[in-house]
Image (cartoon, helix red, strand yellow):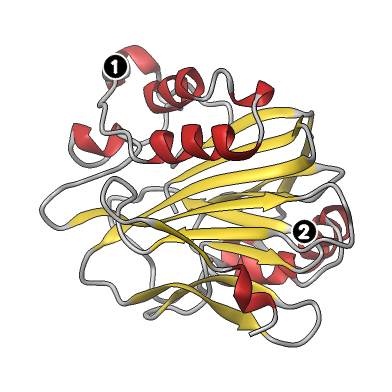
């Protein structure tokens, strides 16, 4: 997953809304949506056909967990555990607080390829940094619109700035109007002005790999691009199941379909 937009406790009637694009090599096998766990709590999400796991998981209680990868010049380390296990481990809980407490106490970032995660529910949202080696760094986030790409949350990013501009009025919307705005955001091909050159950003600046087209929301390059997209809406009523909509392909061309039937199918 390379773009996560999370609206936490700002939308009337839906305390958690997640819009996400998954960017990946076209040759990597995957399934855009599936039942990842049938036993309680039931979990839906995309399935990675190579390393296993998922990039975004949502459970029947309204816990949603998604990740973005930290770019590496050497690529993925096959000797480490799949980071796709992490959203599944988090979504195995009834609430986000219990999820981050459990995962942070049991799992070491150094055992996984590095990534960042957002995990939330109706009442809270957390970021989890899995790029160190000893222990995950967990931060509880305030209500608002939070945007995570392939950099630490809050790091300077032309892509995040652009996404925030596109999402500017989302907090005051609901229903079809909000869904339309988020679908358009995920399908946006604008390549924002590049960040400052590396020498101007300092030694601790995030690594920037690949062509400038990667800064668009919907990515298209010859061998890599946006493979699927999801919209997850968690209603205020704790008895109501999350609404999960999926585009099985780049959201600029692939239509969104309601996959919520998988909760019972």
Task: Report x, y in % for residue 75.
Answer: 31, 59
Task: Report x, y in % for residue 215.
Answer: 30, 33
Secondary structure category for the residue under label 2: loop
Point 53% across, 75% down: residue: 53
Secondary structure category for the residue under label 1: helix
Point 82% across, 61% down: residue: 240
Point 17% across, 37% down: residue: 211
| Disc marking residue 199 | 1
In the image, is residue 121 above or below residue 216? below
Mark 1 Cα-neighbour bin, 10 Å: few <14, some 14–19, many ≥20 = few
Instruction: Name the image quarter holding residue 157.
Output: top left
Question: Please, which residue is most extreme toward the front here?
Answer: 176
- The numbered mark, 2 or 1, whose residue comes first in the sequence reads 2
* Residue to which mark 2 is pinned: 62
In front: 32, or 256?
256
* Tags 2 and 1 touching, CB below 8 Å: no
Q: Is residue 68 left or right of residue 241?
A: left
| Residue 107 appearing in the image | no
């Amino acid at each position: 997953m390379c773009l996560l937009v999370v609206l936490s406790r700002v939308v009337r009637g839906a305390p958690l809304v997640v819009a996400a694009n998954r960017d990946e090599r076209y040759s990597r096998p995957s399934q855009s949506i599936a039942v990842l766990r049938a036993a309680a709590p039931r979990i839906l999400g995309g399935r990675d056909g190579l390393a296993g796991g998922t990039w975004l998981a949502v459970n029947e209680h309204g816990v949603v967990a998604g990740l973005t990868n930290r770019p590496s010049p050497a690529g993925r380390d096959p000797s480490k555990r799949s980071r796709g296990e992490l959203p599944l481990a988090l979504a195995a809980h009834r609430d986000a607080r219990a999820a981050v407490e459990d995962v942070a106490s049991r799992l070491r970032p150094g055992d996984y390829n590095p990534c960042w995660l957002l995990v939330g529910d109706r009442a809270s949202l957390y970021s989890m940094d899995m790029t160190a080696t000893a222990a995950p760094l967990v931060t509880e986030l305030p209500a608002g619109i939070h945007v995570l790409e392939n950099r630490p949350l809050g790091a300077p990013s032309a892509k995040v700035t652009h996404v925030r501009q596109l999402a500017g009025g989302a907090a005051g919307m609901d229903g079809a109007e909000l869904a339309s705005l988020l679908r358009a955001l995920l399908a946006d091909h604008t390549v924002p002005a590049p960040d400052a050159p590396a020498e101007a950003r300092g030694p601790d600046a995030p690594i920037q790999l690949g062509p400038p087209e990667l800064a668009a929301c919907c990515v298209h390059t010859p061998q890599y691009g946006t493979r699927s997209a999801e919209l997850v809406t968690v209603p205020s009523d704790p008895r109501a199941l999350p609404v999960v909509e999926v585009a099985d392909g780049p959201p600029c061309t692939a239509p969104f379909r309601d996959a919520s039937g998988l909760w019972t199918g």
